[in-house]
Image: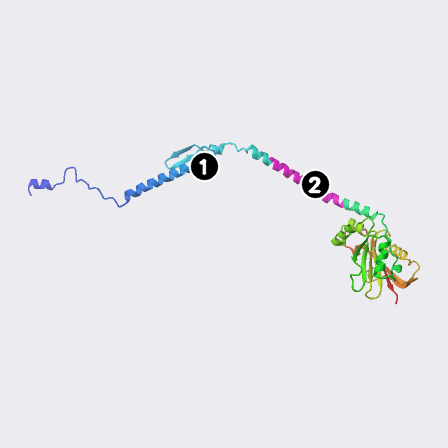
Amino acid sequence: MTRESANHALPPADGPEEAPRPSSPGTGRRSHARADASHSRLNAEDVWESIKNSLFHREKSTVRIGDVRYHDGAELSRPLEMPVRVKAVMLAAMAVAAVAGGLFLSKYFDQVMNEPLRQQEALQENLAREVSYDLPSLAALMPLDDEAMMASLTEAGYTLYERTPVGTNPEGGFEVIKLPADLTVEEAGLMYMTGIDKLSAADAVRLLKGAWTLDVSRKAGESIRLRYADFDSGTIEKAIQGAMQAEGLESAEITDNGVDDSGNTFQAGTVATDNGTYNWRVSAIELSEMYDISGLPNTAFFVGIRFGAAA
């Protein structure tokens, strides 16, 4: 090999010139896409921040370092003060709540502390009422038919509440309640609809004192029952004696007496009148045995008088 040839074969002193490497397909495009997306994201954040500041009327200073934005933290260190309008509304609400709570507590303590005292005072007032029973004479009613009996009671001027009106029972008979003179039919009707057992002791005394119930039966022979509450006699013996005296039975023949299976103390016998001879029975029991009402006086009695046709 000649020198010329050898020299020609040697590489240049500066070394071979490196050919440019072919780029991978799409490499340059992806780089530009990432840059565009990042730029687009930053622009969107800037827009959203601008919108928030515009909506809430606040300007916040920020510091951007690279892709990170640091917000000004001055708002976190400022004193927390409630707006005057909100504060006024809250104070008004607190005042209303305090008044309502005070009224509730006042009513609650009034019910707990004073209501029993008021009920006791009302009970004593009703017990002290001067009301007349005006018990009818059963011996005088016995010979009458239903219509004539009812006419006789109406003519006597009683305030009557017809529980079973005349003519409504196919077998005959009726039931009527004579009310206290100081109680209206509407008031009494509401109390009876409520149920005597559900009344307070004061209301029960107001309804029962001066009232009686007359029950006429024609089912198994003619009979009349008269029932009422006695608040004045004080003892069961006096209650029976008072009922016998009201019906003219003081000197009537007594054929039976004692305490029956239901706990009633009774006396029974026959009596001869101008209208005929009748069997009679007078009984009495503590009123608390008839009505489950707390506070009823233990000197009150439920009295029953019955007349029936003698065999």
Q: Residue at x 77, y 46 (%)?
A: 119
What residue is pinned by disc 2? Answer: 106
Quadrant in which the C terminus appears: bottom right
Instruction: Report the side of 27 relative to 265 (left or right).
Output: left
Q: Quadrant of residue 70?
A: top left
Instruction: Report the side of 90 relative to 199 (left or right).
Output: left
Q: What mark, if any, has residue 276 been given in the picture? A: none
- Residue at the outermost bottom position: 311
Nearer-the-camera pick, 200 or 69: 200
What residue is pinned by disc 1? Answer: 52
- Above or below, 274 relative to 134: below
- Magenta segment boundaries in residue numbering: 91-116
Quadrant in which the N terminus appears: top left
Does the magenta segment cover residue 13?
A: no
Give the color scheme: rainbow, by chain, secondary structure or one colour: rainbow
Query: What's the residue type where badge 2 is placed?
Result: Ser
Q: Quadrant of residue 118?
A: top right
Q: Tag 2, which secondary structure?
A: helix
Q: Position of residue 163 (x, y in %)?
A: 78, 57
Asked if the residue at tag 1 contacts the one at tag 2, i.e. Cβ–Cβ closer than 8 Å, the answer is no
Q: Tag 1, which secondary structure?
A: helix
Query: What's the residue type where badge 1 is placed?
Result: Lys
Q: What count of labels does the image hold?
A: 2
Q: Quadrant of residue 72?
A: top left
Real-space Cα distance between discs 2 and 1?
51 Å
**Any part of residue 174 in sight:** yes
Does the magenta segment cover residue 104?
A: yes
Circle nearer the viewer, 2 or 1: 1
Nearer-the-camera pick, 262 or 36: 36
Q: Residue at x 45, y 35 (%)?
A: 54
Q: Position of residue 275 (x, y in %)?
A: 91, 62
Q: Position of residue 173 (x, y in %)?
A: 81, 62
